[in-house]
Amino acid sequence: MMPKPLTDQDKRKQISVRGLAGVENVSDLKTNFNRHLHFTLVKDRNVATKRDYYFALANTVRDHLVGRWIRTQQHYYEKDPKRVYYLSLEFYMGRTLQNTMVNLALENACDEATYQLGLDMEELQDIEEDAGLGNGGLGRLAACFLDSMASLGLAAYGYGIRYEFGIFNQKIVNGWQVEEADDWLRYGNPWEKARPEYMRPVHFYGRVEHTPEGVKWVDTQVVLALPYDTPVPGYRNNVVNTMRLWSAKAPCDFNLKDFNVGGYIQAVLDRNLAENISRVLYPNDNFFEGKELRLKQEYFVVAATLQDIVRRFKSSKFGSTEVVRVDLSTLPDKVAIQLNDTHPAMAIPELMRILLDTEHQKWEKAWDICTRTCAYTNHTVLPEALERWPTDLLQNLLPRHLEIIYEINRRHLERIAKLYPGDQDRLRRMSLVEEGDQKKINMAHLCIVGSHAVNGVARIHSDILKATLFKDFYEVDPHKFQNKTNGITPRRWLVMCNPGLAEVIAERIGEDYIRDLDQLKKLLAFVDDDSLIHDIAKVKQENKLKFSAYLEEHYKVKINPNSMFDVQVKRIHEYKRQLLNCLHIITLYNRIKKEPNKNWTPRTIMIGGKAAPGYHTAKLIIRLITAIGEIVNHDTVVGDRLKVIFLENYKVTLAEKIIPASDLSEQISTAGTEASGTGNMKFMLNGALTIGTMDGANVEMAEEAGEENLFIFGMRVDDVDAMDKSGYDAMDYYNRIPELKQAMDQIAGGFFSPDQHDLFKDIVNMLLHHDRFKVFADYEAYIKCQEKVSALYKNPKEWTKMVIHNIAGCGKFSSDRTISQYAREIWGMEPSLERIPAPDDPRQ
């Protein structure tokens, strides 16, 4: 297909934060684009498809990364800095093309080049698949951290699994969630480079032999780990770090060594069993599923990564394979390992296994090296999310590791018994081994004991860990416990997704804030400036119009762009209380129906997010939202004063569209349940106001922007604790609050499900009789708070002033700040904002 030429008005205005489009630059980009189309993709312009053009552009941009990537790695080999290894089972990266252009200051040049070639860059960007190798916050945090580590010049590596299938695609069929496999690699991935030369063996099963020469793990099954490297560019500093994701490969002799006549074909087909390890991401968020395949995944990434870490530690200069460091005793001086939740916890026994069985270190020395190298980040206090692996599963799959865990526990409990003689209950509570019907290993306890630092992800969360979940451990080792409040990268979450706002800010305070987000507080000087108030409101309205057009095109729904965009996008979970939002929608609907002539603030309420496929209640919550929409959206009395939309297939790329267009951000979890949240920060940075509880990072957001500039409501952690002690009686609220009773009776009586009156009986029963998250207890405060929101929205100037206070208070929530604190306070590294020489600069 031939590209259609664009008219001049199609051409987007040059935005300074997108880099300058120099004539030579543009000319080179066009040349390289055509070269890739011809030589890389083997396509003639006359038969090239849009996808071909996307790949040509991606390869052209990638060319600008390669020289910097090689030079960065050379720089690390020469300088031999301490390196940090961020181990995570999830990296929720989204798309790469535009982010790379932003960080390399190529966006305007590429826009101009594609325009001159008769192509629309936005159309090409839309062809890229999201790399959806994560479930939600934990995986997206890892992606933001990679961006910040590169932008701060840290020698950092992200290590994870190259899942063939990422988080499922969500389709809504007859109001229900239906899952579809995410075949994201179908057309190939231009951003990765396979590295078969660094393939590593990973062992499973087998048995342990204790011999005079030491311990041997024998008769194992081997799976090969094949690494794929993806470049991670820093923001305009010429640093390009590496994310290395492992893919499982069966060895050539797989199932053929014990070859039986006629079994050859079956043996080759069985290679799939080994390669299934990296087939699919487990789609659970904040929920532990103790399956053998998941444990295999966790050990697979850890074993391959630790071999890589030791190899890199032992070799020296660039390109040299000779071993320089023989002794691993200085490992903690050169290596930091950060465990993103307990999923990579097997790194602790695996590092011990290497030190003891391969390096023949004494236990005490090995343990000292291990604890000084590893650090652990906790992401949740929900009991159902905590990993507890059955010992029989470990005994079968990783027998040597279980032995090592038992020895870690023996020594740990010996120490506790000395400190608290006769306190048997404390020993039971603090043991790594949980006795019961089934013996289990508590992986969080393993991580605490095996690490020199343990952190929560927001101040309130870290305080809760010390006071409750890890109280016993805090009493013994208070120095281990830290807080590192989460952050987001302002490159993707402002400059890239909201260039209009980034530019309005740059016009007032310059561009340096992109590297140093604290500078946003300079905006406070302009809070009463009519031109800034006008510009901020104008950008928001443009974003809303653009998103309205997107909704109309993709969802066939027409919405009122002058209505308040009230948005709750996150994984569907009872603790996040999408049901509280539903009760507000129904209440608002009933009020409009009762007084249709009142001057209501129009709202478009959008809820989006995926439910884990096995989480019945979450799937039913989605069905309730779609059912409410079916009634509300077709009620002519209500008209366009209230619309309810379920946003299908929420993912990074949809977040980048909806967040800049939002007016109100819903952060309404029960106090004490959301460890931090990061979506909350993205909305705040993009000019939405927050309605929320005092939970997670909301507490610190209120502190930074001023509590009067957020809509805070509901119980605090202390109120929730008090209610747990006194008892929560949902029926009391139901009988006492008429509007709540009316809403519940409508759900229960089939008002929203006329074809099946008892469709939502499980939700009704849960809310009335066993609601762990106390939805009704916050209902009245929430409704009152929403009335305040509606009232302020009628005064656009005061609303926008409040928005400016919020944007000005965002500095703390840059992942650059978070990573600087990890570096200095946990990893023993110093971040740097200096640029390293570009590939075409002379070497220093």
Image (cartoon, rainbow, N blue to C red):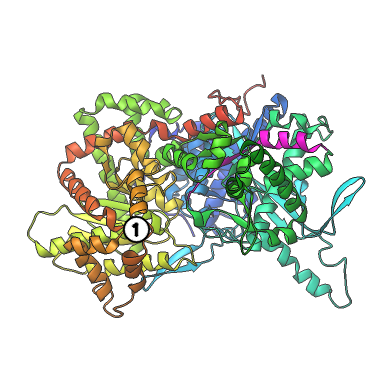
Magenta range: 361-381
Q: Where is residue 390 in the image (x, y as percent from the top left)?
A: 65, 60
Query: Relative to 313, is 168 on the left or the right?
Result: left
Q: What residue type is labelled 1?
A: Gln
**Within 10 Å of the Cα at label 1, are there few (<14), some (14-19), or many (20+) other Cα atoms?**
many
In-front residue for pair 561/476 = 476
The residue located at (81%, 64%) in the rendering is 254
Q: Residue furthest top?
A: 844
Secondary structure beneath dot 1 equals helix
Q: Mark 1 points at which residue?
A: 578
Query: Relative to 401, is 652 on the left or the right?
Result: left
Q: Which residue lies furthest to the right in this view?
A: 212
Query: Relative to 3, is 797 on the left or the right?
Result: left
> In this rendering, does residue 319 appear at all?
no
Q: Where is residue 753 in the image (x, y as percent from the top left)?
A: 28, 75
The residue located at (83%, 44%) in the rendering is 357
Quarter of the image for residue 75 reads top right
Query: Relative to 589, is 571 on the left or the right?
Result: right
Quarter of the image for residue 635 reads bottom left
Q: Residue furthest bottom?
A: 755
Q: Position of residue 466 (x, y in %)?
A: 49, 39
Q: Is residue 790 magenta?
A: no
Q: In this view, does 607 lie above or below 72?
A: below
Quarter of the image for residue 71 reads top right
Q: Which residue lies furthest to the front in this view?
A: 422
Q: In this view, does 656 lie above or below 455?
A: below
